[in-house]
Amino acid sequence: MALDAVQINGLSVPERNAVLLRLARLLMEAAGVEVEEGADDGR
């Protein structure tokens, strides 16, 4: 999966971080890891 694709390059840094955070959370949930809402480390 290329995260440097043209669609990603058009995003601002905060937008890209939000997308990556959501993707990571989705992958963790798919793997069966319990993800707490509000488990944001402030990044």
Image (tube, rainbow, N blue to C red):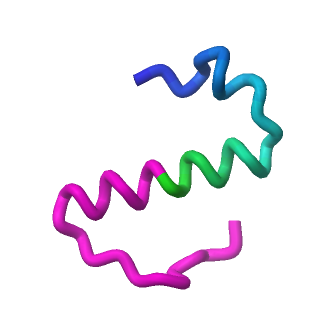
Q: Residue at x 79, y 43 (%)?
A: 13
Residue at the far left: name it: 32
Residue at the far top: name it: 6
Q: Quadrant of residue 6?
A: top right
State whether the magenta stretch is mostly helix, strand or loop. loop
Q: Residue at x 41, y 60 (%)?
A: 25
Query: What percent of the width, then of the height, locates residue 40?
Result: 58, 76
Exactly how many numbered labels are in the figure? 0
Query: What percent of the width, then of the height, locates residue 29?
Result: 27, 63
Q: Is residue 17 magenta?
A: no
Q: Is the residue 34 above or below the residue 29 in the image?
A: below
Q: Residue at x 68, y 42 (%)?
A: 16
Q: Is the residue 22 above or below the residue 33 in the image?
A: above
Query: What percent of the width, then of the height, locates residue 26?
Result: 36, 56
Q: Dividing the image into 4 quarters, which one contains the C terminus?
A: bottom right
Q: Dividing the image into 4 quarters, which one contains the N terminus?
A: top left
Q: Is residue 41 magenta?
A: yes
Q: Residue at x 59, y 47 (%)?
A: 19
Q: Give left or right: position of 17 versus 28.
A: right
Region rendered in magenta: 23-43
Residue at the far right: name it: 12
Query: What percent of the width, then of the height, locates residue 2?
Result: 48, 20
